[in-house]
Image (tube, rainbow, N blue to C red):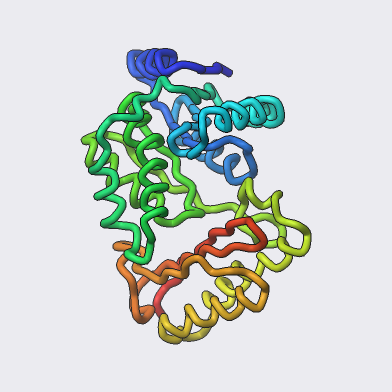
Amino acid sequence: MKIIESLEELKTYSTSLKNNGETLASIDTYGDFHDGHGSLITKANEVADKTLVTIDHMPHYERYSSEKYSKFLDHYKKTTYVSDLKFCELRGVDAVSHIPDTTWDLNEDFSFVTDTIKTIIPARCHKKTIQEWTHLMYFQNTHLMKELQPTFDMCGEKDFYQKKVFEKIIEGLGLSIQVIGVPLVRESDGLAASSRNKELSDGERKRATIVYTVLKEISELDSYPTVTKIKEYIKNNVVRSRGAVQYIDVCSENTLQPLDTISEKAVIAVSAVFGNVGIIDNIVINSK
């Protein structure tokens, strides 16, 4: 398995594959791997000749001072990096890149990314959320995709908005990259697989399972109430489980436009906090 630690190496690797007529699937991550990442790797291995996992720890997105950023990277390298590499190697990954430095041009104009996000992410998102998404999309899709230009970009569907945003940004860049969505993976108690789950206490984890429980309950109803009542039901259950709701969206699976009734295939997306840990989840339901 090849380890890539510079932007120049990354470009050379990508160019070499293209010259050999090989396809490349890219998986963009923040490391600290779990079964959800494993499913992305499995799918990537199925669709492409080569699989590349990128571990993106960019200072701009992490919002750290220089000193804190250095400490963060040092801690990651000491505690998680080796196990992340082993995780990838055991699953047949061909290359892993980790380029967490100022090689990246942080001053490039990426205003179109912000504009694209605003057309997709619901209006209820506050300024901070838009900024965070802009940084995420900039590094993972605007800058990285321009340099790498893989055949496929693998996208987990735990955050349902992500794939739609990726597709729009890649289209805006004029790149011929196919975004492939991979269904989210659940742990044994129903929680969507996430690196953050290990930060939950036993009690918080048990309470957090209410998110998927209510989503599943709603999906199994013989007929759906109004969207307002669906949101109230989810919120009341999360609050009773001592969680804080960040958002509950019910929108068209195709267009992501908000719905008042389940009149078409729809996605219910939820973000909640238990303790200090954010939980995101979603479920797709058909009209009845």
Q: Quadrant of the C terminus?
A: bottom left
Dividing the picture into quadrants, the one containing residue 108 is: top left
What residue sits 50% from the left and 65% below the top?
A: 246
In this rendered view, identify the residue nearer to me: 67 or 180. Answer: 67
What residue sits 30% from the left and 57% below the top?
A: 120
Does residue 264 lie above or below 136 as drawn? Answer: below
Q: Report x, y in % for residue 130.
A: 36, 52
Q: In this rendering, would 138 be left or right of 217? A: left
In this rendered view, identify the residue nearer to me: 254 or 256. Answer: 256
Q: Report x, y in % for residue 220.
A: 55, 78
**Figure label count:** 0
Can residue 283 be seen by looking at this rendering? no
Can residue 178 be seen by looking at this rendering? yes
In the displayed image of the protein, which residue is found farthest to the right?
202
Does residue 254 lie above or below 108 as drawn? Answer: below
Dividing the picture into quadrants, the one containing residue 274 is: bottom right
What residue sits 56% from the left and 28% below the top?
A: 67
Does residue 279 lie above or below 108 as drawn? Answer: below
Q: Quadrant of the N terminus?
A: top right
Q: Report x, y in % for residue 198.
A: 71, 49
